[in-house]
Image (cartoon, rainbow, N blue to C red):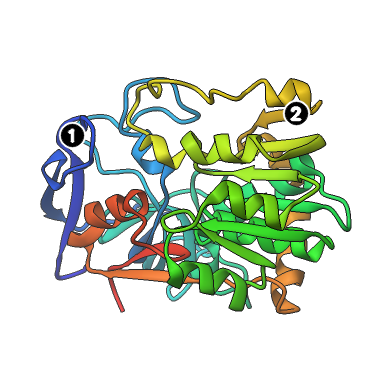
Amino acid sequence: MIDAMNRQWVLRRRPEGTLRDEDFELRSVPVPVPGPGESLIRVHWLGIDPTQRGWLNEGDNYMDAVPLGEVMRGGGVGQVVLSNDPDCPVGSWVAGMVGWQDYVVRSAGGLFGLNVVPEGVSPKSMMSLFGAPGLTAYFGMRDIGRPEPGQTVLVSAAAGVTGSIAGQIAKVLGCKVIGVAGGPEKCSWITEQAGLDAAIDYKNDDIDACLTRLAPEGVDVFFDGVGGSILEHGLAHLARGARVVLAGAISSGYQGADPASGPRNYMRLALDRARMEGFIFLDYLDRFPEAFVALRDWHAQGAITIAETVSSGLESAPSALRAVFEGRNLGKQLVEIAG
């Protein structure tokens, strides 16, 4: 038995507008006991992604809303501390939907279960490179954007984990890549560490003037994770036959309501014979192995760098989720629960 309590963040009420700590309740319950064929996992890290905010709304989403009174849904990694499953022995690392809590019982793997981390793979990378961010970047860039060598690619939220991976994939594919990020620190990181060709600071730069200078022939692929005015700036600078990849809309706050207005200049798509397409990485489930191999190889070659921002302690989870909407994170936002 584990001589400890299991702290859990449970959803107390559906957020209205900006997420607040009071929307959740931090409770303590006994540590669960694994049954036959099950394992007890001590959660070490939580991965925080913008999409988690969308799971708190009652409206349509690609996953059901988190029920009131239930543990907040979230991905993470942990280590097996008790086991009745020979395929998941004590000491194994697992990754998947652990929830915002100290301990979780593993009964099965699968898409939304807890899967043993392959030998030689960093457990934390299962939340970034080999998780939803890396898969979104891979399929969004390769299949929806379809960049060709020598073309110009624009990536918004380029200092976030998904955008930074997408931009680096475009570099691997032989493209000129321009990243949009907020603040000098992030802009320096995407050029000096991630290796993108240029950075636009949306907080301080004239975006249109920068795009006119950096992409005089227009943007061939625009990988957008922001929406709002950033999407409008990108649409204003499309090349003929451009592809716009809708990977997210963090400017909306994912608060369950449509923005007050759409992109005013959407007719650029018609005039430039461009295409704008959205997708969810789960659409490519049968091709996950292909993506894992490519991402692993590029990372091993040093072509993909991952930045991390770490918050300390389970109690910081709501604040960490707010941080990704306030631009306070560089790369993957993590919460360290156990060292």
In this rendering, the answer to whether 158 lies above or below 253 is: below
Question: Badge 2, how many Cα within 10 Å: few under 14, some, many 20+?
Answer: some
Which numbered tag is attached to residue 69? 1
165 or 267: nearer the viewer: 267
The alpha-carbon separation of the residues under discs 1 and 2 comes to 42 Å
105 or 73: nearer the viewer: 73
Which numbered tag is attached to residue 195? none
Label 1 sits on a secondary structure element that is loop
In this rendering, the answer to whether 93 lies above or below 9 is: below
In this rendering, the answer to whether 192 lies above or below 134 is: below
Left or right relative to 216: residue 124: left
Q: Quadrant of residue 320?
A: bottom left
The reply to whether residue 234 is in sight is: yes
Left or right relative to 91: residue 26: left
Q: Are marks 1 and 2 in contact (CB under 8 Å)?
A: no
Q: Residue furthest right?
A: 149
Residue 12 on image: x %, y %: 14, 36
Q: Residue at x 38, y 42 (%)?
A: 52
Residue 224 on image: x %, y %: 59, 43
The amino acid at mark 1 is Gly
Q: Residue at x 57, y 40 (%)?
A: 233
The amino acid at mark 2 is Arg
Q: Residue at x 35, y 26 (%)?
A: 256
Quadrant housing the N terminus: bottom left
16 or 190: nearer the viewer: 190
Q: Which residue is mark 2?
A: 275
Left or right relative to 134: residue 41: left
